[in-house]
Structures are given as structure tokens and as C-alpha cells.
Image: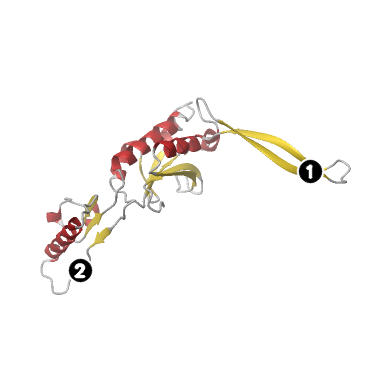
Amino acid sequence: MARVQTMKERLNIEGFADIPGEIRVRFIAELDEQAQDGFKPRVIIIDRGKGAQTIAAIDTRAQAFYGDVDLAKLTKATQLAWDMLTRQTRVKTGAARASFRLYFRGREVGGRGDIDRIARAMTDRDVMVIMGPTVPYGRKLYWRPAGPSRVIKRTHRAKVRTRDRSGTVSVKFSTSYTEPMFRAVKRLLRRRYPDLYSDDGWRDYGAGGSGRRWPALAIGGRGNPRT
């Protein structure tokens, strides 16, 4: 993936009568310099996202983020993953499907309707995390997805002692388990969106109560993924 660059303007305010004006001048100069090299900012954030988001309205800070994350693809992949996960969650009262949460940089940021908004704030190093079902019986639902499921079979070999304990023999045995829904979704995402990062795991962001770990799926760009 292409580099991600964040430009931050922090000025020594001594001697400046018009601080916002100086920030605007320097920020525009930085944008022009990057444009000459063929780089256009993917996201510009003015004053930490507060107030009117225009360069003319800069008060204390301006940031420009550069990268080649395909926002449309990232949004579509995350929405697809959300829909697949909720669809594979067994329904009795609907509470489990309604308990999925979207996390970004370690904080809960909403649900499915917020995916597009969060995608536009991401750099190539960020991931969005879908977590759930965040209900007390969520672990059971994780291992028992609704609908047709893939059964994973494994063959093992082990050395065991003979009955008279005079030696050992090689024993072959098989095990099988139902593929949990997060791994099934991750497998599909990696096949359909190979240029995006996706991985599953258990996280303890505090959804549904602190100190609990919940199944989660992280999706983002390929640039050193992290949460």
C-alpha cells in the first residue's frame, strides 16, 4: 500500500498576531507541495473535527492524511462482514443480533450505520472491529452459527504405551468441529478482498461489561494493521 502521511501544524505563537492565518498559510503551502509530487489528501481534519471543516475556518490545528485505502471497498467489505455475522447469529429474542458493536481505535463508535463514517476517518494503519454477539451466551453462539456450517476435520497421530507398558504404538484418530462464524466470514473476506487486512480474535474492549472477552473481526488496510 502507499505511504500514509499525517501533516500536523504546531506553531510557536510568539511574534504572531494572527495565529489561525499563519496556520492556514503554512497548511496550504504543505498541501501544494504534496500536490506537486502527485499526492492528494484522502482526509483533511480541521481543529480535531470540531466546527466548520474548511481551511478558511482553521483555528488551532490542521491535519491531512494520505494513503491509498479504497474507502468504497473497505466500507463494502465491512458491511458485508456485519451482515454475514448477524445473519449467522441464532435468533430467539433478537437480543444477540442487536448486540453487535463497531469499535475503532479501542472505542465503541456505533453500529452498522456508522461504518461509512468511520471508514472516511481511517488511515492505512487503522482497522475497524466488529464485536459480538456481546451477550452472556455469545460464546455459545460463536461456536454454533445458524444455517449451513462447514465442518472442519483433522487427523492426528499419537504415541501411546501398550497395555503391558512394554513399549509404545502409533495411534491414528480424527476430530471434527463446526467452523465458528467469525472464521467463516474471515475466510470469505480474504478470498473476495485479498488487498484488505482481515483477522479474527477475542478482545476485551469492555462491550457488554468490563473484564469480558468477545469474538471480534478486524478489517482495514494492509499498512501495518493495528487496533
Give the residue at x 33% y 36%.
Answer: 76
Which residue carries the number 1 mark? Answer: 160
189 lies left or right of 25 = right
> x%, y% of residue 98?
41, 33
> x%, y% of residue 218?
42, 44
Give the residue at x 23% y 55%.
Answer: 64
> x%, y% of residue 2?
31, 52
In the image, farthest residue toward the front: 37
Q: Can residue 62 be seen in this view?
A: yes
Type of amino acid at the residue the image marks with label 2: Leu
86 lies left or right of 112 = right
| SS of the residue under disc 2 | loop
Write down the quadrant of residue 59 in the picture: bottom left
Give the residue at x 21% y 56%.
Answer: 47
| SS of the residue under disc 1 | strand
Pick whichever, 158 or 27, lies toward us. 158
Q: Distance between the residues labelled 2 and 1?
A: 72 Å
Q: For mark 2, does the 10 Å Cα neighbourhood hold few (<14), some (14 to 19), or many (20 or more) residues?
A: some
207 lies left or right of 19 = right
Write down the quadrant of residue 192 in the picture: top left
**Above-or-below relation of 36 to 71:** below
Q: Which of marks 2 and 1 is nearer the N terminus?
A: 2
Pick whichever, 152 or 10, lies toward us. 152
- Of the residues tagged 2 and 1, which is closer to the observer? 1
Type of amino acid at the residue the image marks with label 1: Val
Which residue carries the number 2 mark? Answer: 11
Q: Is residue 133 visible?
A: no
Q: For mark 1, does the 10 Å Cα neighbourhood hold few (<14), some (14 to 19), or many (20 or more) residues?
A: few
Q: Total label count?
A: 2
**Above-or-below relation of 81 to 3:** above
**Above-or-below relation of 141 to 162:** above
> x%, y% of residue 204?
48, 48
